Each structure stands twice: as C-alpha cells, then as structure tokens.
Image (tube, rainbow, N blue to C red):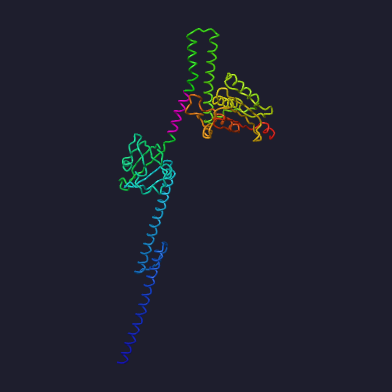
Amino acid sequence: RKSLFRTFFVIAFGGTVLALLLAALVGDRIGSGIRRLTTTAEAIQQGRLGVRSGLQSRDEIGVLGSTFDSMASSIQEKTEALRRAADEEAQLRNRVEAIVAGMGEALVAFDAHGRITDFNAAAEDLLRLEANSALGRPVEEVVLVRSEEGTDLGPRLRYADPRWSALAMLRAAHDNVPVALTVGALRGPDGRAAGGVAVLRDLRGEREVERMKRHFLSRVGHELRTPLTPLIGYTQLLAARDLPSERARPLYQSMLTAARRLERIVEMLEFFASLDAGREVLQPVRVDLRQLLNNVVDERLAKANGAHEITRRISRATPPVLADARWLARSVDELVDNAMKFSPAGGRVTVSAGASTSEPGMVEISVRDTGVGMSSKEVAQAFAEWAQGDESDTRSYGGLGLGLALVQRVAERHGGRVTCTTAPGKGSRFSILLPSLVDHEGAG
C-alpha cells in the first residue's frame, strides 16, 4: 500500500510539474505575442505607420497578429491618402491665395453674416486700410460705396445672390474714387449662398484716359480749325470774285501760311504716332549747327515782324553733331516759338550754341527768353505730351502742347537731353545737349 501511494504521488507530482511547464510554455508564447502587438500598437501611435507585428502562426495569436497587421496597412494607406489630399488642398489654397493677393482689382470676401473674411493687397491700396483692421468687420462699414446718382449701396453688399454690378463712387480716406463694383455669392457644399465677394476696379486711370481723349480731340479740333478758317474764307472769296493780282497776292500768302500751319500740325502728330508705333523717323547726318541755327533764326525774324527781338550767339568753334537736320531744326524752332509765345511784345529771345562748358564732349544749343517763366511744378509738367504752359488759358496761347515733348524726344533719340532753367517772372532758358561729332570721330 505504501508503495502504491508512493507511485501515485510520483505520478501526480510529475503530472503537476509537466502541466506547469506546459502552462509556462503556452503562457510565454501568448504573452510574447501580446507584447509584440502592444509594442507595434505603441509604435503606430507614435506615428511610425510602417511598423508591423510579424506574427505568423495558425493559432489565435497568429490570426490576431495578421488581422492587426492588415488593419495597420489599411491605416497607413488611408493616412497617406489623407496626407496627399491635404497637400493638394494646401497647394490649391496657396495658389488661390496667391492669385487673390496678386489681383489688380480689390477683392473683399465676407461670410453669411456679412463679416469680412478676405481682404487682398489691392483692397488695402484702394481703401487705404490694412487687412488686419478690416477682417471681421461688417462689409458695409468698410466698403463705403454710393451709386453715381448718390444712392448708398452699402445695404446691398450683403445681398450677393444673384450677382449684381454697378458703377459707384468709393469713399477711401478723404478721397472719392470711381470704381466698377461687382458683387457675387460664395456657395457652400450644399449649393446655398455662404457669403459673398465684392470686386472693385479702380476707374481713375480709365477716366483720365477719357479726359485726355476729350482734351486731345478738343485741342486738335481747335488747332485744325484755326488755319482752316482763313483757308476756307479766302478760297470762297477768290472763287466768288475776280480780284486783281495785287489784291489777291496777300490772300494767297495768308492761305499759304495757313496751309503750312496745317502741315506742321499733321507732321507733329505723325511724328509722335510713328515713335509710339516703334518706327524710326530720324535720319542722322553730319550737321553744321551754325548754318542750321542761322536758318532757324532768319525764318523766325521774317515771321516776327519786329514784335520780338531775336539775337544769336553761335560760336564759330561749335562742333558739328550727328543728327536729323530737319527735326533738330524743328526742335530749336519750337523752343524759339515758345519763347516768343510766352514773352511780352518787344521781349528779347537769344539763340546760342557752342561746346558745353559743364559737360565735356557735348554741344549745347540754348534758347533764352525774358518771358513769364515757370514754377517748379510747371517745369515738372512741361515736357509731358499735351501739356500747356497755362491750361486755364489754352486758347490765348494756342498750340497742341506737344512742342517741348517733341524737343525732348528728338534730343533723347540723338543720345542727348534737354535742360531748363527758369523762375516765375524771370524768363526761361531751355538747352538741348547733344554728343559732339568731333569727339566721337576722334575716339574712333
């Protein structure tokens, strides 16, 4: 019996030890799998989406590991897809923001409550207001617009659906700016209006072009009509009556003078049109300035009839220049004409030429008068096309306002420039500086 009990005890003890060993082995296998799954989950949580458990077995732990790895791969794919979508959206947003920021027109976007959400750089410039000060404010408080009839358009700004547009006056700082206003709706995913956007185009440039066009047509019409009047009148007189030659000759002379004035106007308009179109109209040749200036002064003396004293001071050592003789003579004649026009009767006009004492290698042609002179503001505007010395009295002085602009263009096309020294009531001195041909030939 004792032997039997001892045998049973040994068997029971051995079975217990074996069961414990088997339990330890199975527990270690299950525990290691769970630990690998836990480590992999922590790595994924930290952002390392490419980590996998790698459990490969046919038991439940292997099935769980395989399912976990499959789930991790799906998460990685969807995360990468979301990242690509986010990158594309960011690129699109940046592109849209760059387009909006680079727009020449002012753009003001607002939400469904009428509060400003976007305010581009052009809007800052036009409204003279920084974006930070505009964002979040009601659009009608920032964009102060009235129709050309004076109606306040502020209450309409929030009503962007349907789209509408109008010509308006924008209140910006202390100025009223003409604008073309267009307001449209911004729609949400459901297609409903979720706000709006107002685009304002500054019309000051266009209005100025229109003003200049009207001014140009008015001035050209007046200048053409002035010589046409005697031409038509004398022609009708000569056609209706048979006048003796001694009475007809002055009429013919007046008609010739008027025709030449018309020709002068047409030539000047053609000159500017050709230069603006990129066509070269100047044909430079070697020019003897002494002879050219003497011819200009002699012609002007013949036309002055003693109303002005015109003198010349042309140095015998004046170097020749490479220039278009016709247009250079025309430029000097324009300066003399202006000097006579803005000088009182009996005023003195002096034409001089010689090597420049202040700029070596340059020849200086100057026209000085004892006329009304100009202020610094008038000097700044004098060389602009269609500018007049006295815009308020254009008819008294006449002219297209292209004379000084022509002089400047001719000088610059010859590699030179024009200077002016003047003061109100003390007369003016205009100088054309051109490269000396002698120095250029010597350098060659």
* Residue 15 located left or right of residue 331: left
The magenta segment is 207-221
- Does the segment drawn in magenta span residue 36? no
Identify the image quadrant of the C terminus.
Answer: top right
- The correct choice, above or below, for 118 with respect to 396 in the image is below
- The correct choice, above or below, for 266 with respect to 194 in the image is above
- Does the segment drawn in magenta span residue 217? yes
- The correct choice, above or below, for 114 with respect to 314 in the image is below
* Residue 57 located left or right of residue 266: left
Q: Main secondary structure of the magenta part?
A: helix
How many numbered tags mark residues here?
A: 0
x and y, in percent, of residue 101 in the image: 43, 45
Taking depth in this image into account, of 4 and 77 the one nearest to the observer is 77
x and y, in percent, of residue 404 in the image: 55, 29
Taking depth in this image into account, of 241 and 396 the one nearest to the observer is 396
Identify the image quadrant of the N terminus.
Answer: bottom left
Taking the image as drawn, is residue 353 in sight?
Answer: yes
* Residue 443 located left or right of residue 176: right
Q: Please tell me which residue is depicted at 42% across the width and 33% down the height of the picture.
A: 207
x and y, in percent, of residue 380 in the image: 53, 34
Taking the image as drawn, is residue 420 in sight?
Answer: no
Q: Please tell me which residue is depicted at 37% across the width and 60% down the height of the picture.
A: 75
Q: Which of the 4 image quadrants contains residue 373?
A: top right
x and y, in percent, of residue 249 in the image: 55, 11
- The correct choice, above or below, for 94 with respect to 308 in the image is below
Taking depth in this image into account, of 439 and 249 the one nearest to the observer is 249
What is the residue that sits farthest to the bottom in this orientation? 2
Q: Which of the 4 image quadrants contains residue 33?
A: bottom left
